[in-house]
């Protein structure tokens, strides 16, 4: 399984012969200036919530690749209004796909579309029917709901925001890692804006001291998991 980081909370996971792209936001991210948005391939695009720093490149990539766009009902209705036709709307809870069963789990955050319309409940995606089991929490604070995750899967890794201010910081992510029973965390949603700049060495050391591994991928980097 391959993980490629495109900056902020945008990443590609390749597993089971499919490319899953999460939260496409590249062109508005100065730190990701080296990424060519037009070269990104995807079979499935998953959108955790409606904020611009998670969907800015959704319409362009979805139209070019004709990837299946998966998100909550409200975001999918909006996407259809933008001319995207290959869609799978869902809401919080489980849904079945050709690649297996997946859960869209609640995130404690907000979700409004760029034009101000309601973007449905924010969430995260739990893949527990794939060869490797993983959870992307989406933008969220620490929640007790995370304690449900071990009921579904013994996770191989998880992807979490660690920048603070709008989401969990590294301290909260460390508690979340305990809640979901996972020792390998990939940190996202850091450094993009002044509010979420972090000290890489300090947060990695925090995880190491707690016996857990925090990976901070470089933008454009591919990691084999
Ligand atoms: Ni957000
Ligand atoms: Mn965000």
Image (spheres, helix red, strand yellow):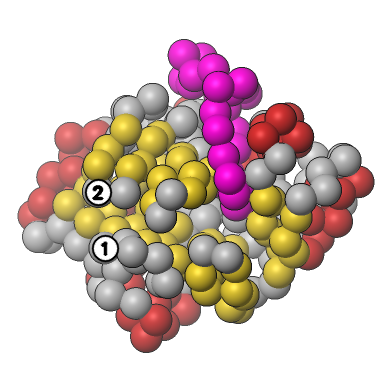
**Is residue 28 shown in magenta?**
yes
- Residue 91 location, x and y as percent? 70, 72
Q: Is residue 156 left or right of residue 133?
A: left
| CB contact under 8 Å: marks 2 and 1 | yes
Farthest right residue in view? 81
For the residue pair 168 and 148, the one nearer the viewer reads as: 148
- Residue 151 location, x and y as percent? 37, 85
Q: Is residue 66 left or right of residue 160?
A: right
Q: Quadrant of residue 210?
A: bottom left
* Residue range of the region highlighted in magenta in the rendering: 22-47
- Which numbered disc covers residue 225? 2
The residue tagged 1 is 156
Residue under the point 87% across and 40% down: 82
Q: Is residue 37 above or below residue 174?
A: above
**Is residue 151 shown in magenta?**
no
Residue under the point 55% across and 33% down: 41
Crowd band around label 1 with a 10 angstrom C-alpha radius: few (<14), some (14–19), many (20+): some
Q: Is residue 217 left or right of residue 83?
A: left
For the residue pair 15 and 56, the one nearer the viewer reads as: 15
């Amino acid at each position: 399984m391959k993980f490629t980081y495109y900056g902020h909370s945008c990443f590609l996971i390749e597993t089971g012969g499919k490319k899953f792209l999460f939260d496409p936001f590249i062109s508005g991210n100065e730190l990701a200036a080296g990424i060519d948005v037009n070269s990104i391939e995807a079979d499935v695009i998953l959108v955790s919530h409606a904020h611009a720093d998670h969907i800015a490149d959704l319409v362009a990539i979805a139209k070019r690749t004709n990837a299946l766009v998966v998100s909550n009902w409200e975001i999918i209705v909006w996407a259809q209004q933008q001319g995207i036709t290959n869609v799978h709307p869902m809401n919080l809870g489980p849904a079945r796909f050709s690649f297996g069963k997946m859960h869209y789990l609640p995130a404690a955050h907000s979700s409004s579309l760029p034009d101000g319309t309601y973007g449905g409940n924010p969430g995260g995606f739990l893949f527990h029917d794939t060869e490797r089991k993983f959870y992307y929490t989406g933008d969220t604070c620490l929640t007790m709901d995370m304690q449900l995750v071990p009921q579904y899967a013994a996770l191989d890794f998880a992807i979490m925001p660690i920048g603070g201010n709008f989401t969990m910081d590294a301290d909260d992510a460390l508690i979340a890692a305990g809640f979901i029973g996972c020792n390998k965390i990939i940190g996202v949603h850091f450094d993009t804006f002044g509010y979420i700049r972090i000290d890489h060495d300090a947060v990695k050391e925090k995880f190491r001291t707690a016996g857990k591994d925090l990976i901070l991928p470089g933008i454009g980097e591919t990691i084999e998991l």
